């Protein structure tokens, strides 16, 4: 898959570990985030990543900040972006199957009960179900 990833200073290590894991598994990962601890503003990172995604060519995007909260809120302000803050394998799967999430978000300062890369793998393996869910996704996107 072709994946876009972006992060603020709160998730430099998490982002690096995700990039390494996905590349080792043969995925193409474009790193649009920061690679040092210098402070940046996550809304800027989210907007830039969303615009790159919407320009086309990526299967999905991953956003990381300290909590995963701010960067997902900011991404979801961009029309066409459905960013899910994922906490476990269940939410990783369901955000694709029912919500057709095109971004998933994680926090570099969060203690997850499962490795983040396992949640990403679960998301990647899931398929959007469409059907009744499409009507709801259209409503999210303002199309209905
Ligand atoms: C940055 O300190 C932090 O606020 C940010 O990474 C994120 O957690 C915001 O939601």
Image (cartoon, grey):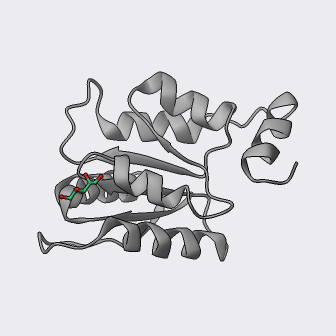
Specify whether 114 is left or right of 76.
Answer: left
Give left or right: position of 13 versus 138: left
Query: Residue at the spot x=55%, y=42% of the render?
Result: 124
Q: Exactly how many numbered labels are in the figure?
A: 0
Residue 106: give x, y in percent of width and height.
35, 45
Residue 31 appears in the figure: no
Q: Which residue is drawn at 23% across and 73% down?
A: 40
Q: Which of 142 and 101 is in front in this view?
A: 142
Residue 107 higher or lower than 46, as above or below? above
Q: Quadrant of residue 15?
A: bottom left
Residue farthest along the left direction in this orientation: 37
**Residue at image location 88% in from the left, 48% down from the top:** 144
* Percent position of residue 118, x then y: 38, 34
- Judge by depth and name the residue closer to the eye, 66 or 33: 66
Along the viewing direction, whichever of 106 and 128 lies nearer the viewer: 106
Left or right, 132 with reference to 103: right
For residue 31, which quarter of the picture? Answer: bottom left
Q: Which quadrant contains ligand 1?
A: bottom left
Q: Nearer the viewer, residue 132 or 117?
A: 132
Where 106 sits versus 24, above or below? Answer: above
Residue 13 horizontal/vertical position (percent): 17, 56
Identity of the residue drawn at 65% across and 77% down = 55
Can residue 61 be seen here? The reply is yes
Say which quadrant the N terminus sits in: bottom right
Across and down, in percent, residue 137 comes to 76, 42
């Amino acid at each position: 898959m072709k994946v876009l990833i972006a992060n603020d200073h709160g998730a430099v290590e998490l982002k690096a570990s995700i990039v390494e894991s996905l590349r080792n598994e043969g995925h193409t990962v474009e790193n649009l985030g920061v690679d040092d601890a210098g402070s940046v503003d996550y809304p800027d990172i989210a907007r830039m990543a969303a615009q790159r995604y919407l320009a086309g060519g990526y299967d999905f995007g991953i956003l990381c900040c300290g909590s995963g909260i701010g960067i997902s809120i900011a991404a979801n302000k961009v029309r066409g972006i459905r960013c899910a803050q994922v906490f476990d394998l269940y939410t990783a799967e369901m955000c694709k199957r029912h919500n057709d999430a095109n971004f998933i978000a994680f926090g570099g300062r969060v203690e997850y009960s499962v490795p983040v890369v396992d949640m990403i793998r679960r998301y990647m393996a899931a398929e959007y179900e469409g059907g009744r869910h499409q009507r709801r996704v259209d409503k999210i996107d303002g199309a209905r």
